[in-house]
Amino acid sequence: MNKIKEWADKNIQGDPVIWLVVICLSVFGILVVYSATGSLAYRAGVNTEKFLIRHTIMVGLSLFVMWVAHKIDYRYYAKLTHFALLLSVPLLLYAWQWGSQVNGANRWIVLPFVGLQFQPSDLAKLALIAALATMLAKRQQKIDDFKESLIPMLAWCGGICALIAMTNISTAVMLFATCMLLLFIGRVPVKYLAMLLVVGAFAGFVAMKVGQRGETAMNRVRSFLNPTEVPYQAQVANMAIATGGILGNGPGESIQRNFLPEAYSDFAYAIIIEEYGLVGGVMVLFLYLVLLYRGMRVVANSDRAFGGLLSAGLTFAIVIQALVNIGVVVGLGPVTGQTLPLISMGGTSLLFTGLSLGIILSVSRGEQEDFSAISGDMKNKLRTA
Amino acid sequence: MNIKHSILLRVRIAFLVAVLFVFAVIYRLVDIQMVEGDHWRQLAEESSLDYRTIKATRGSIYASGNDLLATSLPFYRLAFDPSLVDNKTFTSNIDSLSHLLSKYFRDHSSDYYKKKISEARQMKSRYLILNRELVNYQGRQEMLTWPIFRLGQMRGGVIFEKIDDRHRPFKKLAQRTIGRVNGDGKGVVGIEASFNDYLSGKNGEGLFQRVAGGNWKPVYASTDVRPVDGYDIHTTIDINLQDVAQNALLRALSTYQANYGAVVLMEVKTGEIKAISNLEKLESGNYAETYNFAIGTTNDPGSTFKLATMLALLESGKVELTDSVDTGDGTIEFFDGKLKLTDVKRGGYGKITVQDVFEKSSNVGIAKLVTEHFGDNPKEFVDLIKETGLGQPLGFQLLGEGEPYIKDPSDPSWSGSSLPWMSVGYETGLTPLQTLAFYNAVANDGKMIQPIIVKSINRANKPVEVFKPKVLNKKIASDETLQKLRLMLEGVVERGTAQNIKNEHYKIAGKTGTAQRLVNGRYMTQSYYASFAGYFPAEDPLYSCIVIIDNPRGWNRYGGDVSAPVFKEIADMIYAQNLDIHDSFAPQYTAANNGTFPVIRAGRLEELNELCNQLGISNYADEQASDWVRSSVNNNVVIWKKNHDNTGLVPNVEGMTLRDAVYILENIGLKVLASGSGRVKRQSVGAGVRATKGATIELELG
């Protein structure tokens, strides 16, 4: 026992609560994915464990990515962000024009040799938030300077979100909102944010017209606003929630998973309620709030504005996505196609979630001694406390 | 305020917003579960959603030339909800509806239908099957115009339940070989069963929602598993030849009141089966295709096996065709007279050549020859036969091939009489198809090929898999032996046991067989298995064929009498159709039987009568005159005599106008090719010949 503790102390660092929450949600995710894909696999005539095995491997990989990422001093990421952001632009363009199509949108790039598909928007999301944190941290002293401080940040936010909007409007809107929040947290004056909102709305309008998904987005919003016509998925989701009751029907006992499209990703939360009841559903919400709370703790404990903003941005990105997904399931928003982070089945996007969490953990560990030599110059500039 | 505190404050504000949102979510959850709960639970309870099988369309089976043998068509079962219509409509329309139902199905009176429906209505029944017989699409459309039914399902209560049924356009033709599909859509016999995996395709599954009226409507496509339709099977069956073969067999079976019979016609070079028919007598006395005897039933082949015996004798080099054999008084005894083989001819054939032994089918002669040459070493005899491939399963494409059996000296049941009895076709088990493959090999210069019935498996006219003739044995015997065997097979028809099918147009080569039937382990002396196997034309064989008839009754029950004529009827048909075989023969023009009346020789009585009356020529019809007459002249009077009946025989059309001749000949299914002008002078198919549908008849006018 002591040995395990010794090993864990040495190898697993950072906030233990975040680790615990991540592992809890991942295990929950594996259970839900298995339940939701078993009958799908059976009907398609493939091995019922096929999706379970694939998902478990991806979860394992993403935990590994998270572990590796948390071992790295977070100040390294500041250097990487700019490069990652620059890289994501051509990738987004490529996916939009030449990417492979899934369900009517070219969001995917197939990695040569490995055969894995990944969405450049996952990379862009991470890169933009990290870059924004870097830029905000650098400009804390003159945050009111519109020209020097704000123009570059706003340009990046607008540009990346617009590119993503070409193929995926809901992700773009969500990222935009996260960026706004991060800018708010980073002390950007509210009047500038209001201005950004106007610019964003205009960009969104253009994306609707030029991009591939304008019509889908319009339809989804329209059907959400029409109270008489409940979309098919929402109907089944409501049935699942209603039949789940307080305690649920028990693991693997979902009936609506057979009728719920994307029960293993977009509508996983409905299956959670059906199988684990209101108790299970509130538990999941609670876990996300704990994650958010611990992310906030990291901000409080961080010595530097950069670490705090990075941690805040990434935590909010994950939790906002989770809340949007859950909001859709319970009928608080139009159908978006956002997955439930850490729970939904979804190949490479799990790895990016792992990377995000790894960075948050890295910040929570605080600064490492051996790093100061490398970036001593930065230290002086960024010290805020 | 310092920067860090300001940031923290803003983060906390955002966190609070998130917490608020979480409460909103929990509120919604409780709302859905408690307030709207009953509504949604009831919806779920009704389970108006279900995964339903999307049936794959079963592939079709084609004959050569793309004639459809079996295909899946939608049919409907007619059911009725008698409770839906109001009283006024019901009482004023029930009579006419019952009348139409009775008229359509022709099985019950209109009173029956009226009673049935009225009773169901009184019982407040909501579902009544009006007739088990399925209705096709046209029938359904027609019924939708009937009173009450025309109100539709919702108001009129008519229910058409769609059922995919297997449709065989040629009904009973090759029924057993094509096979049958059971209620689950799975082939159970024949090609339907043997190629079921190809034909059936793969059913899909789709999510459906129940809508008003008990119908299902597909909802969401992405979770559906699409059905994959079945492949089409293209067979080698020739519809016309199949028809001829089946009819010839049926006629022979009926004449001899036999138990069952089978006929297989095969193309020599390719092994393609052109016709295969099996008929068995039912309790009712009618014949029907109940089992594929040609493929599944092994039997003592009887004398047709003598071809294999002769092959062994000739291949061993111990016998010449001209060697003489003393068959004595037609009996040969074994085990001190306990077992006896006899010849058909009473008193025996005396001293005859080896060739005569075969052509006359002398059991004594054959038995003597094998005892003399293989008596010391019966294994040599058996091995020589087995080396040809006879006795090996053919690996035929259809399931259920009978396991062939050729006794080996090592077999515990081998006895001193086994060798002679085997040599004449007993103590052996072969299916008709296996025997035919052996005869086909002799016709095909010694190359034994696997018979095939399925040529290709297609998807939308594109072959997915093509079956090529497979060689089972490149050479079953030396050319010299083969030439002798063929000489003797021709002799059987020329001089031997099948002289009755000898004809001058083309030569048939073959062998008769008359085995005693094994009943309860004993050979019955008065109960036979009559067969004829052979090929034609003898000089350049195109087709091989076997006919077997089990337990014919009556006087002439030998293979030559019973089975050979069936063979000939099929051969005649092919001969008539196949111009390639004709080339070496001159057209069989018949000489004109000239009367003296020059102008009107033959035609339609009504017209000729009027014509003569107009011209003032005295004429009258004799008592037997029919529609179509021929003139004969007696002094100055024209007498109209009967030309032909509608018997299906080719009539004499000489002297007729081309218009009349074409009308008559095309009515009986011939194709007319005319040359010259004037009246018909000569016809290429003589009068009185049985007309074969589709055959061409040439007319010379002048």
Image (tube, coloured by chain):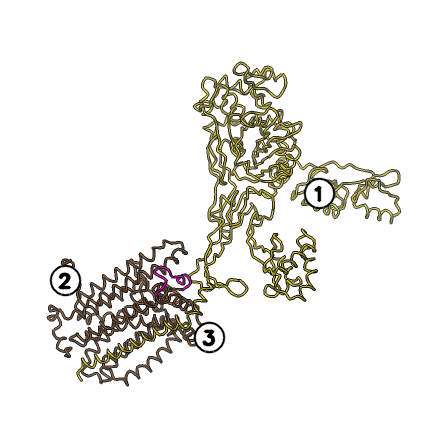
Chain colours: A brown, B yellow
Do the numbered discs 1 and 3 sit on residues whose CB atoms are within 8 Å? no
Residue B456 covered by magenta stretch = no
Q: State the residue in front, A256 or B435.
A: A256
- The amino acid type of the residue labelled 1 equals Leu
User: Residue B381: which disc?
Assistant: none
Quadrant containing the N terminus of chain B is bottom left
The answer to which image quadrant residue B8 occupies is bottom left
At mark 3, the secondary structure is: loop
- The residue wearing badge 3 is A228
- The magenta span reads A247-260
Chain at tag 1: B
Name which of mark 3 and mark 2 comes first in the sequence.
Answer: 2
Residue, disc 1: B699
Graded by Cα atoms within 10 Å as few (under 14), some (14 to 19) or many (20 or more), the crowding at tag 2 reads few
**Which residue was labeled with disc 2?**
A10
Instruction: Identify the amino acid type marked 2.
Output: Lys
Q: Nearer the viewer, mark 1 or mark 2?
A: 2
